[in-house]
Image: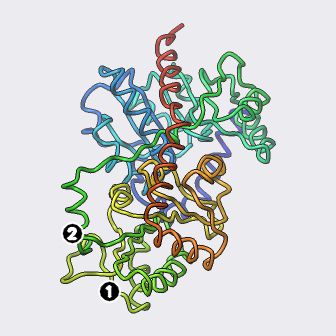
Amino acid sequence: MRALYVFLSYITFFLVSPLLLLSRKTRMGWKERLGFYPKELFLEKMEGCIWFHGASAGDLLSLLPMVKLMRKQCPDRKIVLSTLTNSGRFMAHSRLEKHVDAIVFAPWDIECAVRRAIRHISPELLVLEYTEMWPNLIWEAKAHGAKIALTNGRFSKERLSAYRLLLALSGISLSAFDALMMREKEGLKRARLLGARPEATVVTGSTKFDVLADTGSEEELEALRCAFGFPAGARILVAGSTHEGEEELLLDVFLRLRSKFQTLRLVLAPRYIDRVDRVCDLASQHKLKVKRRSRAVSGEVDVVVLDTMGELSKAYQLSEVVFVGGSFVSRGGQNILEPAAQGRAVLFGPHMKNFEDCVAVLVGRGGVQVNSKENLENVLSKLLAQSDELRQLGKMAKAAVEQVSGASERNVYFLRECLKTHGD
């Protein structure tokens, strides 16, 4: 079965490669994706390093607290970070670069690319995130002698049959993993049904709850406010990680709120930076003075469109209230914990299927789920009219996140145990 999977992975790759080349998520860094890494990245010997892999920007944020802890607790270890998406690469450089020794695109899961990557990186421990089950990568890392771990593990009930098929076809088993750190008990049970060794599986929770965003100094925040073109005393609504269809809705709501709250300003942070021009056009069509964060304009503005990486967390700190996108469209939500951890009241729409655990933590504790544009406007109007309640909701949100934190420390403990037993 192993040979069949290798053959099929090559065939599949050649069939889908034109789409991968055109996709905004994967069209960068093709030499690295084929396992050809720049020599300067690995001038220092990486053998025995820890290799963390997260597919997207959101996955990397979940890895951030673990990477920081591993750097602190294992200062002599080299750490390599890989990602699949272009946005993940930008996020890695803006938020994690100072904590790691190299940032690369992960190889496509074809045998030749994976072998080259393993030869360059030479990991002692490969740490995968969420459901990143790449058979060739796992197989080759194991053949190299690396320990394999999964963090924030989740195997959904609906996809259990698909996982069984993938594992059977690829010739690997979850028994190959030295540690599977699952988010909840049901996930642990499913991992064992899929062949994981009981002694290698444990429930540690989700590190998403540990992602307390970087805190900017007062000077940095004031500089950002000035760069936005907002006056002192402006009340700022930040809409983070928005998707197509949501910005127009938010601009409509913002215009109506401005008739009541004239000092209100809006920051729009589209999930994909290549949509910035489109979002700016929408704001202009609403007769609002708009600017891109990276460009200077004269005078005060109504709307800023964030077109930089790594500044959303600081924008959240400037805000009075936050809306998180991906929740009024079928995307299934985005990270609502980052603004909550900053002590901000967080609003989000009805479509949060990918973040149900986060919703369970925040609803009624500083998080407010709204089901329509009208509902969003009404809730924002009431909250903006009651600043004390807004601040109280923010305190509740921060406390809720702190109460469920700690998964990163638990995960790092098991990762270090893997390193201790390497070679046993």
Q: Residues within 10 Å of mark 2 (few under 14, many from 20)?
A: few
Q: Is residue 193 above or below residue 271?
A: above
Task: Answer with left or right where residue 73 lies relative to residue 52.
Answer: left
Which kind of residue does numbered mark 2 sit on? Cys
Q: Which mark is residue 289?
A: 1
What x and y, as percent, mark residue 103? 35, 42
Residue under the point 43% across and 87% down: 259
Q: Is residue 380 above or below residue 142?
A: below
Q: Which amino acid does the dot numbered 1 rest on?
A: Lys
- Please provide percent x and percent y for residue 143: 55, 22
- For disc 2, the marked residue is 226
Residue ID at (42%, 69%): 237
Q: Quadrant of residue 347?
A: bottom right
Residue 354, percent across and down?
A: 64, 53
Please state, as top left, top right, bottom left or bottom right, where the C terminus lies in the image.
Answer: top right
Q: Label 1: state its secondary structure.
A: loop
